[in-house]
Amino acid sequence: MAVVRGLVGGVLHAVAGIEPIKVEYNVGQNLSYTGLPDAPWGPFRYGFSSYSGLVGSPRFQAPPQDDLRNGIELSSAVPLGGTLRMAVRYKRDNSVRRARSFGTVGGAERLTNTNEDHRLETTFPNLDLTINSIERVPLFRKKLDRSSVQLQFQRSTNETFRFDEAPGSPRVEGFGRTEGGRTTATANWTGQWKHGVSSTLNVNQTNSNQSASGTKSDGVSRQAQASVRFKVAPAGGLKLPFLRGGLKSGMDVTLNTSVTTESRVRTNAGTKPVPEAATLAVTFGARGDYTLSRNMNGGVELGFTRQSRNDIQKQTVNTVRLGFNLTFLF
């Protein structure tokens, strides 16, 4: 019984710590008439009605095209223990574009058809967690001044479909419905080390899928980026062979690298998967910024990039970059 009471108490405590849910709802409509013989009435001009207020042609009673949008977003934060709180969001957007066709029927102008293009996007879960004060961990206490980690996870889905409707006929869904999804996981770390060295590390992965008319596409992309920034300022200044007297204030140096991969396959109904993309990009870079005088500063940059494809097209491109810049302040 004590175990049950403790479990219930823990659940109630966690629920009580959830932040109030913030709700945002938006709705919008965009429409216009063309060729009106007179000015529309006030409710239309101020956005309270979609009817122009004019009589006569059906073109005056319903706009040739209008866009409708509505969306809702819910957000809160869940306690995880101590000062840790994870942000949680839910978002749903719905948009409809209607197009109307008019024609002459029995000697009179009438509405002949209405097309509706729908797009529905839903994002859930959308989680965000930031962990500060990593430098307090015993392993890093003597090495880091400040450090934090940010973790994100997001899953989104989308649908597009179409409806056709003629006056006096049932509403029929047209061809071309598409469905897709995307899942993204991201981790970012930043650290300020002792002696003025700072570094970052970012990694992310995105899985995506799309299906339409018997064709399915699946893809995955991954990226890792890292950078280190520090200052080179030896006693007596930094000596350079091409600069007489050297650099008294030293040089700010940034080193960075990244690796990006992407693969995607397409599958038609009843066939084997076909590779659409298989790419790899590797980048290394170094940059140094320096000050020559109160009115002059400059920089030098060196970089290397290797891009390769191993799908339908076989290709490898190597690029070397070398640049200089000099800035004068007046």
Image (tube, grey):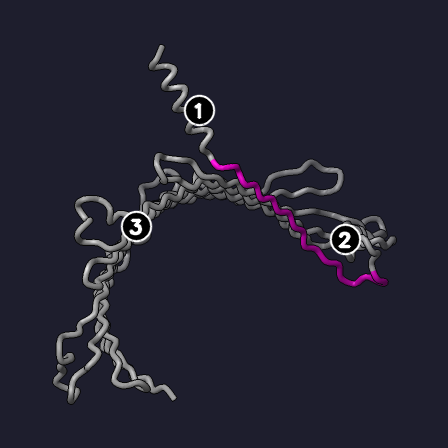
Quick one: SS at disc 2?
strand
Mark 2 surroundings: few (<14), some (14-19) or many (≥20) residues within 10 A: few
Q: Which mark is residue 12?
A: 1
Q: Amino acid at mark 2?
A: Gly
Quarter containing the C terminus: bottom left
Relative to residue 20, is residue 149 drawn left or right?
A: left
Relative to residue 203, is residue 178 drawn left or right?
A: right
In the rendered image, residue 8, in percent from the top left (x then y), is placed at 41, 19
Q: Which residues are magenta?
A: 19-39
- Tell me the residue that label 3 is attached to: 148
Q: Nearer the viewer, mark 2 or mark 3?
A: 3
Point 62% across, 48% down: residue = 69
Residue 36 showing in the rendered view: yes
Q: Is residue 115 above or below residue 226?
A: above
Q: Amino acid at mark 3?
A: Ser
Q: Which mark is residue 326?
A: none
Q: Amino acid at mark 1?
A: Leu
Quarter containing the N terminus: top left
Classify residue 208 by image quadrant.
top left
